[in-house]
Amino acid sequence: MRFKTIHPTEHKRTVLEFRKDSFRVSFGDTSGFGEEAAYLYWLEKKVSEFPAGFVLIEDKGNFIGQLELSIRAYEGQKLDIFIYTI
């Protein structure tokens, strides 16, 4: 198994499918997903700021999941939030 930094342009189809799948699992459908272009813009920005925090998981030549790490403030404290999809 390998972790490969996401390149939103190169991995566009893959990251969109993983993101939509996370919406299906979490909310039952993808209606809350919104604009694909907006997600790709957000992802491009985040990857440029912290490339090691946005990776695809590859096993035997196939991408099997995606990991996104974001740091968000909660009541004045920073929290690490992980989103993991397989």
Image (cartoon, rainbow, N blue to C red):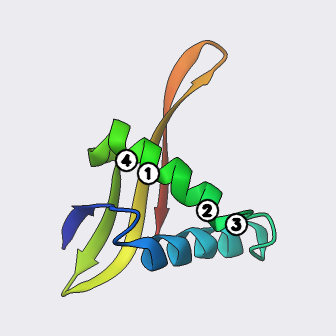
Tell me the residue at 34%/42% (across/down).
48
- Left or right: residue 84 compared with residue 24: left
Q: Position of residue 24 (x, y in %)?
A: 69, 75
Image disc number at residue 47: 4
- Left or right: residue 51 compared with residue 20: left
Q: Quadrant of residue 74?
A: top right
Q: Mark 2 and mark 1: span between their CA atoms?
A: 10 Å
Find the residue positioned furthest to the top: 76
Q: Secondary structure at mark 2?
A: helix
Q: Quadrant of residue 19?
A: bottom right
Q: Mark 1 and mark 4: span between their CA atoms?
A: 5 Å
Tell me the residue at 45%/43% (across/down).
45
- Looking at the image, which is closer to me, 47 or 76? 47
- Left or right: residue 19 compared with residue 52: right
Earlier residue among tags 3 and 4: 3
Pair 2/3: label in front? 2
- Amino acid under disc 1: Glu
- Amino acid under disc 4: Val
Q: Secondary structure at mark 4?
A: helix
Residue topped by disc 1: 44
- Amino acid under disc 3: Ser
Residue topped by disc 3: 26
Pair 2/4: label in front? 2
